[in-house]
């Protein structure tokens, strides 16, 4: 049994019980919900930052218009400063969004891997159970019983 954070993962060849599967599923669903909310908040934050940036640019433009007698070099310096601040804010926001997207992708990959493992486990169980439950050929014929018993023993020997 391997534990990654709060997620319990069975080692190869080791089976998990339904309680652990349910617990892991609930944990992954909870984490997925948290990541979705976090991503939604980041998107809303980005929209707000863009709105504030537009407003700030408009305000700066109004200030520049109001100061028509300001020298051109001061205006250029002010614009460069505002542009630099805006670029830095966009980079920080992009970084936060990328980190959250990476976590969401990792969670999705882990969920898909777990689902593949679970579906593989159920296919193995079905293959093991099918030969054990085949009827014998005739009631008085022991060869059918022997064949079923042999299949049972060979399946159990491989597991």
Image (tube, grey):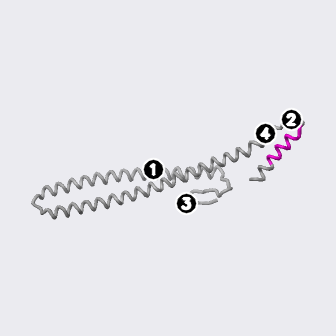
**Residue 68 percent coordinates (x, y):** 11, 58
Left or right: where 4 falls relative to 155: left
Mark 2 to mark 4 CA distance (whole Å): 12 Å
**Residue 134: which disc?**
4
Q: Quadrant of residue 131?
A: top right
**Residue 74 percent coordinates (x, y):** 16, 64
Circles 3, 1 touching at the beta carbon (< 8 Å): no
Give the answer, above or below, for where 25 lies relative to 95: above
Q: Residues within 10 Å of mark 2 (few under 14, many from 20)?
A: few
Say which element carries label 3: loop
Circle 3 sits on which residue?
A: 5
Say which element carries label 4: loop
Circle 1 sits on which residue?
A: 36
**Quick one: label 3 or label 1, which is nearer the N terminus?**
3
Mark 4 to mark 1 CA distance (whole Å): 48 Å
Instruction: Choose mark 4 or mark 1, whichever is in front.
Output: 4
Instruction: Look at the image and give the residue range highlighted in magenta.
Output: 141-152
Q: Residues within 10 Å of mark 4 (few under 14, many from 20)?
A: few
Mark 2 to mark 1 CA distance (whole Å): 60 Å
Left or right: where 112 falls relative to 60: right
Residue at the far right: name it. Answer: 140
4 and 26: which is toward the camera = 4
- Residue 146 painted magenta: yes
- Residue 89 painted magenta: no
**Quick one: label 2 or label 1, which is nearer the N terminus?**
1
Circle 2 sits on which residue?
A: 138
**Quick one: label 4 or label 3, which is nearer the N terminus?**
3
Q: Residues within 10 Å of mark 1 (few under 14, many from 20)?
A: some
Q: Residue at x 79, y 47 (%)?
A: 152
Q: How many marks?
A: 4
Say which element carries label 1: helix
């Amino acid at each position: 049994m391997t534990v990654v954070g709060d997620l319990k993962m069975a080692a190869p060849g080791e089976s998990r019980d339904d309680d652990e599967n349910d617990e892991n599923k609930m944990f992954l669903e909870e984490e997925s919900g948290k990541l979705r909310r976090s991503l939604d908040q980041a998107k809303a934050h980005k929209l707000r930052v863009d709105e504030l940036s537009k407003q700030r640019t408009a305000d700066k433009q109004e200030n520049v218009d109001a100061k028509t007698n300001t020298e051109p070099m001061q205006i250029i310096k002010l614009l460069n400063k505002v542009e630099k601040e805006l670029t830095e804010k966009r980079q920080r926001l992009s970084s936060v969004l990328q980190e959250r997207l990476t976590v969401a992708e990792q969670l999705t990959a882990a969920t898909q891997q777990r689902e593949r493992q679970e579906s593989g486990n159920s296919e193995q169980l079905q293959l093991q159970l099918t030969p054990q439950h085949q009827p014998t050929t005739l009631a008085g014929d022991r060869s059918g019983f022997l064949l079923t018993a042999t299949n049972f023993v060979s399946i159990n020997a491989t597991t």
